Image (spheres, helix red, strand yellow):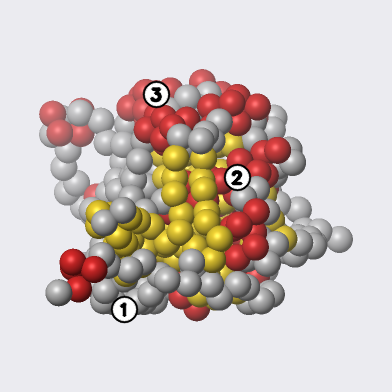
Amino acid sequence: MPQERLLTGIPGLDELLDGGFIPGRAYLVRGGPGAGKTTLGLHFLATGVANGEKTLYITLGEPAEQIRTNAKALGFDEKSIEFLDLSPTSEFFTEIQTYDIFSPAEVEREPTTQKIIDEVTTLKPQRVFLDAMTQFRYLSADAFQFRKQVLSFVRFLVEQKTTVLFTSEGSEAAPDDDLQFMSDGILNLSYSDQKRTICITKFRGSGFRSGYHSIRLTSAGMEVFPRLQPDAYKRVFVPEPVSSGIPALDQLLHGGIERGTITVLSGPSGVGKTTIGLQFMKEAAGRGERSVVFSFEEDVELLVRRCHNVNIPAQTMIERGTLSLLKVEPLKFTPDEFAYLVRQQVEQQQTSIVMIDSVSGYRLAVRGEDLVSHLHTVCKYLANMGVTVILVNQTKAFAGEYQGTEYGISYLADNVIFLRYFERYVNSQLELRKVIGVLKKRLSDFEKSLREIQITRYGIKISEATPEIRGILSDLPQGGKAPERDKL
């Protein structure tokens, strides 16, 4: 029988927690200033309110009125959350307060504790968020007293059948190791200039998703983007050939690229890689299938205009729901956020073809992390789901010795299609032309010949095999014969 869970109100976090918190336990939320501890707590309480539960926010630092204002700005129903404000008032500073016999901790601990007991006993909340537990340390005579006090407090709340989230303001100078031992689970929030992350290091009585996962604080609260685990996803599909709709290209590929495979389109800028990928999508749209382009470089309007100029009706496909062009700003999205975006398109929109344009643009989103491992994760997930993947790989050099991929991703590819520029004489005039060929195909044989390709306003035209094209993989690609006068 599945174990009962309490939703956090953050879908991605519930996924990390294997469904949510276990009721009647106490969980520690750690993190520095601005890491998102309060926002997470508000999600937790607001979700309880939405489920008809009584909730309580105990604040020992920030004034309750300020928290209410912030909660309202984030869209939470702050009026339905009960607050117990134990934060210091301005009177504490303005009035003279002296303790002649007892220390401040001994004098203030009892009324503070009693207020909490009275509120919990009267309200009987199902969910409590306490910010921050480390404040009790200043009401304790020593570390041993603090430990006893916290254990007693947590036990009291659990006996009231309450699920507790409490925060910590631990630091190197004042570590919170004791709180970590006492909690049933630990959620670590961190924030740097590059990104925000969450890492679960303890969760008694349940499995959980380990590792660091991206989070984002927005005007609507917190979003969590679990790191993708491709092996956890699998869809039954038939690896049938996916046609390009261009007979000559399908002949090169012996029928097309198979469903659920990864194809690398490699070549220099402007040679036609994106257009070839969109051609597969155009043909898929005719079968009623949906495709998505994640563009890390070009704006959607420019892509639509380019498609129109080469007889690919992208705008019509978008209107019919068979194509989605998504501009991805690489410095805005982390790899986890991008993977989550891909999952939404596949699992919610039933996408059959995904093109990432381009690998170099995606590399910026990785922000110095291992590009290959992140790309491997996304591509293997898509392949497991039966999605045809097209990776646009832009080579740096327009000429020179051919290099298929520049980031060590060739092992990922089931198919490698390359495009190159070459020079040939036409009517005694030297012209710059384009050639297409196949270097690799795992699931079937392929044609070993090279074909000239032209991208016109009527669409893509690919010639018959052109034996006179030579040197394509060397420094000097050439085609045709030079005029007699040029042989002198």
Q: Which of pointers 1 and 2 indicates the residue nearer the eye?
A: 1
Residue 240 is labelled as none
Residue 279 appears at what percent x and percent y?
56, 46
Mark 1 or mark 2: whose residue is earlier in sequence: 2
Is residue 483 placed above or below 41 in the rendered structure?
below
Marks 3 and 1, how far apart in space?
62 Å
Mark 3 or mark 1: whose residue is earlier in sequence: 3
Q: Which residue is mark 2?
A: 281
To which quarter of the image does residue 369 belong?
A: bottom left
Crowd rating for badge 1 (residues with CA inside 10 Å; few <14, some 14–19, many 20+): few
Marks 2 and 3, how far apart in space?
42 Å
**Visible residue check, residue 318:** no
Q: Tell me which residue sits at (56%, 69%) in the image.
A: 415
Residue kind at label 2, given as amino acid type: Met
Q: Which residue is mark 3?
A: 73
Residue 440 appears at what percent x and percent y?
55, 75
Crowd rating for badge 2 (residues with CA inside 10 Å; few <14, some 14–19, many 20+): many
Residue kind at label 3, given as amino acid type: Ala
**Disc 3 element:** helix
Q: Tell me which residue sits at (19%, 46%) in the image.
A: 99
Residue 208 appears at what percent x and percent y?
60, 66
Quick one: quadrant of the C terminus?
A: bottom left
- The residue sitting at the front extreme is 484
Q: Which residue is mark 1?
A: 474
**Disc 2 element:** helix
Q: Which of pointers 2 and 3 indicates the residue nearer the eye?
A: 2
Residue 435 appears at what percent x and percent y?
42, 61
Q: Is residue 319 left or right of residue 240?
A: left
Q: Tell me which residue sits at (60%, 65%) in the image.
A: 252
Q: Tell me which residue sits at (40%, 70%) in the image.
A: 469
